[in-house]
Image (tube, grey):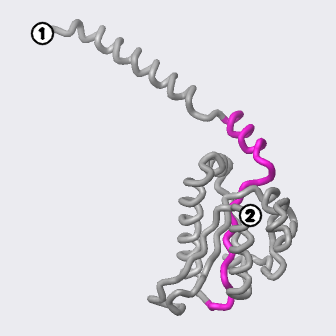
Amino acid sequence: MEYGHPVIQALFTAGISFCLGWYLCKKSASAKSVSKICQSVTGDLKLVLVVRNDLGMSKGKVAAQCSHATLGCYRNALEDCPQIVSAWELCGEKKIALKAPDYETLNKLQNAAGNAGLPHCLIHDAGHTQVPSGSATVLGIGPVSLTKLLENSNCIKHSKLVKGVCAFPSVQYTPVFTL
C-alpha cells in the first residue's frame, strides 16, 4: 500500500502539527487571563506555615516539616476547592513561614482554621530524629486569600493584618530561618 509522495506526507504532518499546536496554545492560560484570575481572588492567595518554635528543630527539620504541611494542605485544598488551588498555582504559589511559641498556639490556630472551613493540615512528627513521637511541629493553612482569612469572624479573633500578610497575636512575625 502506497501512502503518497514524501513531500505531501511531510506537508500534511506539518499542517496537523501546526493546527494541534495552535489549538492547545489557545486552551492554555495567557498572561492576561492569569492576571485576571489573580485579580479576581479577594486578596493575595498564600499558604501560611506556622512552625512550632519551642521544639528547637534544626533548619533542615523545619524545612522537612514545612514540606509535609505544604503537601498536606495542597492535597486537602485540591479535594475541597480545586479552583483556589489553580489560582494559587497560577499566581506564584506564595507561602509565608511564621513561628508559634508553643503547641497551644498551634492548636488554637488549627481550631480557628477548621471552624472557618479553611484547608489546613497539622503535622505530627514520627519521632525518629529530633523531636518526640507525635509532636505537632507545623500547621499549614491554605492556600487562602489572606483577606478572606481576616474577614472570617471565626478566625479574626486569632489574627490581625500586619504589612499585608497574616499574623497571629502569639505568633512571632520573624522569618523561620535566615540565610
Q: Position of residue 57 (x, y in %)?
A: 59, 87
What is the distance, in whole Å, between disc 2 and disc 1 at their CAs?
67 Å
- Which amino acid does the dot numbered 2 rest on? Ala
Residue located 45% across and 23% down the image: 20
Residue 119 picture quarter: bottom right
Q: Quick check: 64 above or below 26?
A: below
Q: In the picture, which quadrant includes the C terminus?
A: bottom right
In the picture, the quarter occupied by the N terminus is: top left
Under circle 2, the secondary element is: loop
Name which quarter of the figure residue 164 lies in. Answer: bottom right
Task: Identify which residue is drawn at 67% across, 71% down.
Answer: 49
Closer to viewer: mark 2 or mark 1: 2
Residue type, mark 1 in image: Met
Badge 1 is on which residue?
Answer: 1
- In the drawing, what numbered circle is on residue 172? none
Q: Give whichever of discs 2 and 1 has the lower sequence position.
A: 1
Secondary structure category for the residue under label 1: loop
Residue to which mark 2 is pinned: 116
- Is-magenta flag for residue 38? yes
Q: At which x and y percent is residue 141? A: 67, 66
Q: Which residues are magenta?
A: 31-56
The crowd level at tag 1 (other Cα within 10 Å; few <14, some 14-19, many 20+) is few
Q: Is residue 128 left or right of residue 169?
A: left
Is residue 52 on the magenta stretch?
yes
Q: Residue furthest front?
A: 115
- The picture places residue 35, in percent across and down from the top left corner, at 73, 39
Using the image, determine if residue 170 lies above or below residue 153: below
Q: Residue drawn at (64%, 74%), measured in percent from left and top?
A: 139
Q: Residue at x 82, y 61 (%)?
A: 152
96 lies above or below 13 = below
